[in-house]
Image (cartoon, helix red, strand yellow):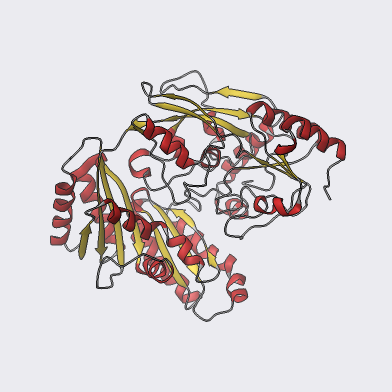
Amino acid sequence: MSALPDEFIREIETIVGASGIVRDAERMQSYLSDWRNAYRGKAALVVRPASTDEVAAVVRLCNEHQVALVPQGGNTGLCGGSIPDGSGTQVVLSLTRMTRIREVDPANETITVEAGVVLQMLQEAAVKVGRLFPLSLGAEGSCTVGGNLATNAGGTAVLRYGNMRDLALGLEVVLPDGQIWNGLRGLRKDNTGYDLKHLFIGSEGTLGIITAAVLKLYPAVRSVTTAWVALPSAQAAVELIGLIRGLCGDRLTGFELMSRQSVEFVLRHVAGCNDPFTEVHPWYALIELSDTQPEAPLNDLLEAGIGEALEREWVIDAVLASSEAQVAALWAMRESISEAQNHEGPSLKHDISVPVSRIPEFIETTDQRLLAQFPGVRIVAYGHVGDGNLHYNISKPIGSEDAAFKAQQEAIMRVIYDAAVSFKGSISAEHGLGQAKRAAALRYKDPLELELMRALKATFDPKGLMNPGKVL
């Protein structure tokens, strides 16, 4: 039974139509838990508007009745940012019906899309006009543009193209009182005051609801070279990326670091994945070069870099992909790590960043502290080493009880976050804070930063109705 008055629900239905409301308990379930089942909540209603005007009307009505809203896109997040609380009084606002690509402007190298457009659809729309939209991540077949913007998603190509904040030129946002801010400007230069779009990117729906965006396009990639490299240490990875960058410049699109434990989980649990090497190595890197020129000499460049690294003993072995199938297979190894880890029982996901130069020291120091305090835990370390983003995840010791491991979650998190901050890093690199890291942010962020963030929240959302309980 909904906690909302029947009159309110009738008004919502008038706005979005019968197909825009989900009330049935069974149909609502997919909106009330994340894909890992790590976060679960309750909602009075799920509303699915099909246009910005409908979003604005729903938000306006909720503001009048003081009903809290939880914006939701593809629901692929890892921090519970799009899941309602357990009160059953909140309304989930799903933007998945807003799937229009409003404009493609190849001459201006921009595309204007609505928030519910799936990332893969956006990539395909760019390809149709001979362009590239470079954001790429494991959930691209189901995550949405709105969610990518709300969490400032990064992905595997940040090294060359930046994260979602770097890819956005303009936004359309429904404010907490229902007003629509039309900032859909495809301009690279606009010095007319505060750049408001950056307040909403990464805000996780706590300041307003992003309904559309103007995003950057790039020239299509016509040459790609991919290599899987065995490394003796994480320090070797830092040395290698410096070497490859110096040789290849911005042709270096991706540089992914993976520990042996990460790869072992994939080989154990993901069908079709095979170890490229016959011998076991402590660390691996997946390197990708790309160019807009067909038949660019990328293989020669990468072979030269790897050859020099072999002489310096930064690389133990290497394989260059010789077909698209091999490229896909190597990327599948990297992209399957999170999924594979889930098969090993409960896991604690940590998405931290430190300066690239400090990654080896962070890993060594944190590994030692964790294994000393929590013997037997299995450390799954991997990530986008080129931008300092490390997914430092922990699986339970073999044979231990799930409940006992979960009871140690806070203590394990404290060790990892203390280490990240001590190395001048961040407790969240690309997944956001959501509800998972809200308390940790209070502990680790500068008090003045928090004060400024609260002031912004109070200015935009004085009633506290936009995604309450998240971020702040």
Question: Is 287 located above or below residue 145 in the figure?
Answer: below
Q: Residue furthest front?
A: 19
Name the one closer to the observer, 222 or 69. Answer: 222
Q: Residue furthest bottom?
A: 399
Question: Is 264 located above or below residue 8 in the figure?
Answer: below
Q: Position of residue 463 (x, y in %)?
A: 75, 36
> Which residue shows up at 54% across the image and 71% down it?
345
Q: Position of residue 6 (x, y in %)?
A: 86, 39
Q: Position of residue 400 (x, y in %)?
A: 55, 80
> Which residue shows up at 55% across the image and 50% down it?
76
Q: Position of residue 80 (x, y in %)?
A: 61, 52
- 293 horizontally vs 440: left or right: left
Question: Is 100 located above or below residue 36 in the figure?
Answer: above
> Which residue shows up at 61% across the image and 24% down it?
181
- 364 horizontally vs 52: left or right: left
Name the one closer to the observer, 307 or 54. Answer: 54
Question: Is 138 located above or below residue 339 in the figure?
Answer: above
The reply to whether residue 279 is visible in this rendering is yes
Name the one closer to the observer, 38 or 443. Answer: 38
